[in-house]
Image (cartoon, coloured by chain):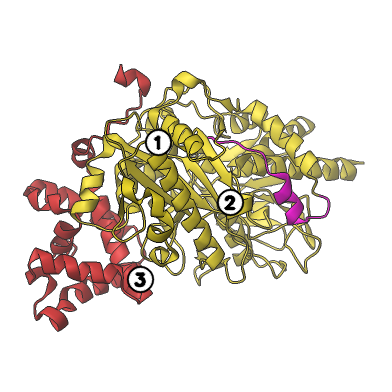
Amino acid sequence: MSTSPSYDIVVIGSGAGGGTVAQELAPLVRDGVRILVLEKGPRFADQDFTGRELEMADALYQDGGAFLTRDGTMTLAFASAYGGSTVVYTGTSLTAPQRVIRAWGVPGLDHGDLTRRSAKYAEQNNVHPLDDPLINDNNRLFVEGGRKAGYLVEQFPVNVKGCRGSSLCNLGCPNQAKQGTNRVQLPRAERSGVEVVTRAEVLRVERDRSLTVRVTEKAAGTKGAPSEWAPGDYHVRTRIVVAAAGAIGTSALLLRSPLPAPRSLGHGFTCHPALILVAEHPHPITNDVGHPKSYFVDHAASERFVLETCMYFPFVTAKSLTGFGPTHSAIMHAFPRLQMILILACDHAAPGNRIAVNRTGSPVVHYRFTPQTIDGLVRGTRAAARIFFAAGARRVHAPADPPLLQAADADRLEERITARHFRPGMLAVSAAHLMGGCGMGRSAADSVTDAWGRVHGLPWLRVADASLFPDSLEINPYLTIMGLADRVAEGIRQDWAATRG
Amino acid sequence: MTLSSPVLRAVATCVVPEAARLDPAQWDELEAIVARAVAARSRAVQRQLALFLTLLEWLPLLRYARRLSRLDPVRRAKFLDRMQRAPLLLLRRGFWGVRTLILMGYYGRPAAAADIGYRADARGWEARR
């Protein structure tokens, strides 16, 4: 095993959580504090982002974006890259709803405090609603249909600067317009002297606060820069560890580490299971140009679903449609006339839905759809169909039998779209809002960390990512992750100052 | 069983009827995409996939007295439709996996994306002017 220098603070992961912590701790470098960020994925150059679907999915996502849950009924999408999943999201940036933070009931976590911190990052990352001329037909039809159908349609603030409307956000912006941690927080941290090492996977956190790290070689023909360190295994010593490898990465890392972790580690996994619904309009619309996700309808509190505009790529669209054969092909060939809506079910922490590790230490996600989650998907699908028809769609493709709903079906959506068509394994459910596993709470009896991300019983070990959520957030999570990471960094700075006394 | 076996082609032409019109080079491209995706999965998943394709090939024997690859297109579609609605999760999931691979192989080709009218371009709005 190679050796490496010792550090004072090591941050594992460079996404919304790790990137934020790195930036917020960077001023400590001036005082001689040595800070290292270890990122499992590579550092991509601007020209690596080609927008080609399979090529980018393979380069950016774990399992090409199709990490399967244990029973194989849902795929989970999460990225490994300098910047983590902030490289591949659409930049939608909302602050946590007050009712959700209250319901979490985490002692010491105040909604006002979280909102103020999230607002700081909204400003840093240029979060704003897009100007009207940049909105495409796919989004306009959602607004028009949603309002006609009686829904409150809201505009997403997004974190873009100089968006050219490639529509390729989920494959990494080819124009560097999206202001993720790869564009804002990490470069700032590096300029201040924080060291970032990519292609560096942390295998274990040891009891003595050291880390077993494996740096992998860049394979021939693959995208991204080689690691900053030579390939090999390292034993990195540190005083403080911040785990920010995402809900699945952090939970799995702590589970395979020989630590006296709280019993609830890995539990409380939620993910906003999502379905993509499409509808065909009689004429071509602008859909594969322009920012894909500009509007939403939030019915989380009343009906357990959120609808968002979206536009995906040919393969993702094809696999998201139910069925196969001529009907499926006909819809695919109508691509220039397709409107799309993403339906997210607001699931809640349920017994058995958890992150575990297998014999080799790789993550395994156990997830069963509760009747309430299925109900959220069913209600969301009906609402999306109402919006499509109100916007003038001539037919909607939905989990129904047969799957094509005609305009005449608009008045009987309750009959056509029912839970029996939503059996797991019959439809393509995917999730990208991966939450929980290291939930915050009062003590080791009910949670993994306190409200400042300190692991109960291991004050040198902090968590700073979506695994902290004790339950579903019910909205897009990034600003909330950044707000929580800001608290984690503040806690570390305070502790550091106290020890220096 | 290899991924270029008659059973995979039989399923592929049922899932995406236009696949029947692919020339040999286009089939090679489709199969290469599928092979890459399968190779990236664990050995256990690869075994399950091979086993499920064998099951798909022989199961129709019970009802139609013919293997899947020898069935006419109508019966083949009916059989696969039964698979996707099967009461057993194992069968539904298996079919879903095979269907996903075929859709990836077919629609993951740039030519197929162009054929359906997908025109996303890194230059965004500028490319449409």
Question: Which residue is tagged 2?
Answer: A246
Q: Amino acid at mark 3?
A: Ala
Position of residue A375 measured from the top left corner of the image (x, y, whole percent): 51, 61
Rendered-image quadrant of the N terminus of chain A: bottom right
Label 3 crowd bin: few (<14), some (14–19), many (20+), radius 10 Å:
few
The local secondary structure at tag 3 comes to: helix
Q: Callout 1: few (<14), some (14-19), or many (20+) C-alpha neighbours within 10 Å?
A: many
Mark 1 touches mark 3? (CB < 8 Å) = no
Identify the residue under disc 3: B44
Residue B53 located left or right of residue A496: left
Q: Amino acid at mark 2?
A: Gly
Residue at coordinates 82% horizontally, 55% vertically from top-left? A107
Q: CA distance from mark 1 to mark 3?
A: 46 Å
Real-space Cα separation, disc 2 to disc 3, in angstroms: 26 Å
Q: Is residue A97 magenta?
A: yes
Question: Which chain is the one coloured red?
Answer: B
Q: Chain of mark 1?
A: A
SS at circle 1:
loop
Query: Which residue extends farthest right?
Result: A501
Viewer-closest of A118 and A361: A118
Question: Considering depth in this image, is A32 or B129 the residue closer to the camera?
Answer: B129
Q: Which residues are magenta?
A: A91-108
Which residue shows up at 89% across the image and 43% down it? A498
Tell me what residue is drawn at x 72 percent, y 68 percent: A260
Spatial CA span between label 2 and label 1: 38 Å
B30 versus A394 height, above or below: below
Task: Give B128 or A59, whichever is nearer the viewer.
Answer: B128
**Residue A416 magenta:** no
Q: Which chain is yellow?
A: A
Residue A218 x/y as whole percent: 40, 44
Residue receiving disc 1: A391
